[in-house]
Image: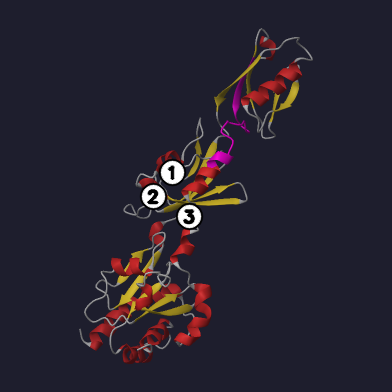
Amino acid sequence: MTGRGYSRNLLIWLLPVVCCGGCASLPQTTADVATTAGETFKPVEKAREEMASKRDLALLEESEEPLYVFGSGDVLQIDVYGRPEVSGQHVIGPDGIVTLPLVGDVRLEAMTREQARSVLTERLRDYFSHPHVTIGVKEYVSNQVTVLGRVENSGRQRFDHPPTLAEVLANAGALPILDKQATLTRCAIMRGRNKLIWVDLKALLTGDLAYNIRMKKGDIVFIPDSADTSVYVLGAVTSPGSYRLTPRMTILDALAQAGGTNEDAQPKMIGLYRPGAGEVEVLEFGSIIAPDRRANYALEDGDVIFVPESGLAKFGYVMQQVAPAIAVLTFVKAVGDGF
């Protein structure tokens, strides 16, 4: 491919990236980058910490109360043997209270059946010598899980039992609505106000049931749109372009999806541009494929990987003259100056 043809093709790939990433100010030299690279770029092990491990999920399930507790809206069937005047259906109100004849207001919210039975029995002893109370649930209105994000059926889901994550996904349709071919890779479970759990759905949907955790009443499940997270591989690779970002995706993973380097590549140095932080890391290819893989960084949404070819420094200068407002060209030149 001629230098002019290569320049034109690369410019076509760079323009969409720049429009999305903005014109951030980028470091000019490898020395400048080194002072901030440790803060911006992290090894792949850092990304793994975001996903809950099997052990963490197992401990989470063990710490939760396995018995169902009553909540607002639940319809209860309360029967007192031989006392039809205080028996019947009762709805737990928004304040967590039910009102029974003779007894009056009784708070049953957040109680199990046994706890509620004990409370009602104690209150009924003021009127009957040996009350025998049974409690059944006619409708589990409060046992809801909310599903948000890119699914076919978002909103609240009601269950008559503590559902598993797989059951919640099945009810939600489990396909991102913007791209029917997209695959689910992760989801966030928000439990209360202080707990956020990221679950590796790719592992769950390929048969690892350790990730099929049991949901708790009030949980919120968020499904991000996998089509909205992309990385870009440009330069001397077989198939330059945009690739969907997956959990734990690394530089080598992205290069493999792009078909690897082509015959024009001189991958002594590889550039990694992170638009979100406006930072550039210029890496030695040998450090990426070294046994410890410490330079095989985990990628983030919008990252740009550039594989140079010979004569890139001159090419970067030409591109700067053609489109001086495009900040990514500074990144291209920085990589080229490494030769």
Residue range highlighted in magenta: 61-79
Q: Residue shown at 50%/58% (left/top)?
A: 50
Q: Which of the two discs, 3 and 2, labels the residue nearer the N terminus? A: 3
**Residue at the disc numbered 2:** 203
Q: Residue shown at 73%/26% (left/top)?
A: 106
Q: Nearer the viewer, residue 173 or 121?
A: 121
Q: Is residue 193 magenta?
A: no
Tell me the CA gap for discs 3 and 1: 13 Å
Indicate the secondary structure of the residue bearing disc 2.
helix
User: How busy is the neighbourhood of tag 3: few (under 14 within 10 Å), some, or many (20 plus)?
Assistant: some
User: How busy is the neighbourhood of tag 2: few (under 14 within 10 Å), some, or many (20 plus)?
Assistant: some
Name above or below for residue 47 compared with residue 206: below
Q: Is residue 235 left or right of residue 136?
A: left
Name above or below for residue 297 compared with residue 201: below
Q: Nearer the viewer, residue 311 or 174?
A: 311
> Do labels 2 and 1 touch, CB within 8 Å?
yes
Image coordinates of residue 254 in percent, x first then y, are 34, 67
Tell me the CA gap for discs 3 and 2: 11 Å
**Residue at the disc numbered 3:** 51
Indicate the secondary structure of the residue bearing disc 1.
helix
